Image (spheres, grey):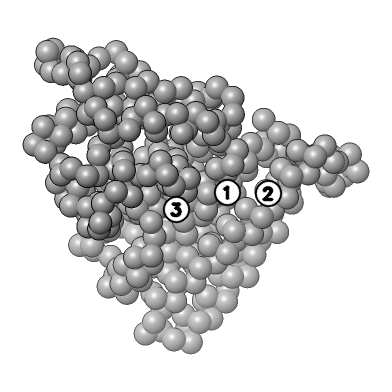
Amino acid sequence: MGVDVFSQIRNWAPRELLHLLDQFVYFFPEEARLSLKRVIDTVPEGTDNLTKVYEMVRQQWKDLRGQDQLSIAVVGPGQTGKTGLVRALSRRQAGNSVSFAVVDVQGLDEYLGYQRETNLSDDLIAADVVLLVLDAQYGVSDSTVRMHRKLAQAPAKPIVVLNKIDLVESPRDVVKAAGRQLRTAVLPMSLADEKRIDDLLRGIVAAYPRSLYPLSRAFPGFRKALGRQIVYEASCAATIAGALPIPFPSFVSTGAVHGAMLLKLARAYGLRLSAERARELIPMLVLDIAFDRAVDYLRNRFPERKTLISASLSGAYTFGLGHAAIRYFEWVTDLLDTGRVLPGPGSDQFSWNKD
């Protein structure tokens, strides 16, 4: 990857935390790293630990805000596979909550606003997400760098997609080189690999969290992959929160992260969390208190490793809780899709509300 995922915190974070996060992220795919960097970048520099944790947790809850429709502009040079990419996405799409606009390199100067230095095109301004599609077989040219810089001036920051990655000998090196030249994260893509489509959708959510709901509606088969990304982000946030001492019990911050994670997972699976159903999730959050006491015991038992203990266990617990929640929501949606009645508190006929 061309950018340092943890550049925002390297100047002040505890060494144990940085080492843990570096090991943590090494095995993650590119789109997951983009998501984690977005979490890291919400942590402000030059403030006390309480402010750092508060801002990070606040962003987790802010991401719950969504929208019903999503507009994606697909731009880039000719013959890079833009139309093929849109066709691949459209074949998997259910409903019309996501719309696409394809723009070829011809006329791109006018589209990007080069002829009007102070204005960008109306189409670009209206887009929620901009995908800049490039051909992995060719290096990043100076004109491509200028194109990316111009696109970065739009309200929707561009997501760089390196298509035809299956046609190069060293995909990882090609992605790293492109990332260094463009100074941004680059998502590898191959239309011959269905998994890459899920990777792209995760990258879109990482760059534009408000796309969570329309993408989960448009691509029901993508929900599990999206759920895993939500868990990755929450685990990263919990790891950092666990490493920063604050004048409150740690379950306050981790519980807030878990609450946001569970609500986002429900949203991803197209479920509206009513007050009655929320009671079923309370035991998951009550476990945070018991977990906090166990972590506190270990911190007192091994004080020389207290930062590592808090950070690693908070991240691991969040990861496990998130995957348990994914299984739960998959069970709920399966019951709803088959028309079966869900058991619920207070009524034998109680059920979830599905969007």
Query: CA separation, marks 3 and 1?
Result: 14 Å
Q: Which of marks 3 and 1 is nearer the N terminus?
A: 1
Q: Label 1 belongs to which residue?
A: 224
Q: Is residue 323 in sight in this rendering?
A: yes
Q: Which residue is drawn at 39% across and 76% down?
A: 308
Query: CA separation, marks 1 and 2?
Result: 8 Å
- Viewer-proximal residue among 277 and 303: 277
Give residue 304's quadrant in the image: bottom left
Query: CA separation, marks 2 and 3?
Result: 20 Å
Q: Label 3 belongs to which residue?
A: 233
Q: In this view, does 293 lie above or below 301?
A: above
Q: Which residue is drawn at 80% across and 39% down?
A: 338
Is the Cβ of the residue at disc 1 closer than 8 Å to that at disc 2?
A: yes
- Viewer-proximal residue among 276 and 110: 110
Per the image, label 1 sits on a secondary structure element best described as helix
Per the image, label 3 sits on a secondary structure element best described as helix
Q: In which quarter of the image is the N terminus?
A: bottom left
The crowding category of the residue bearing disc 2, from other C-alpha atoms within 10 Å (few below 14, some 14 to 19, many at least 20), is: some
The crowding category of the residue bearing disc 1, from other C-alpha atoms within 10 Å (few below 14, some 14 to 19, many at least 20), is: many
Q: Is residue 197 left or right of residue 25?
A: right
Q: Earlier in the sequence, mark 1 or mark 2?
A: 1
Q: In this view, does 40 lie to the left or right of 344?
A: left
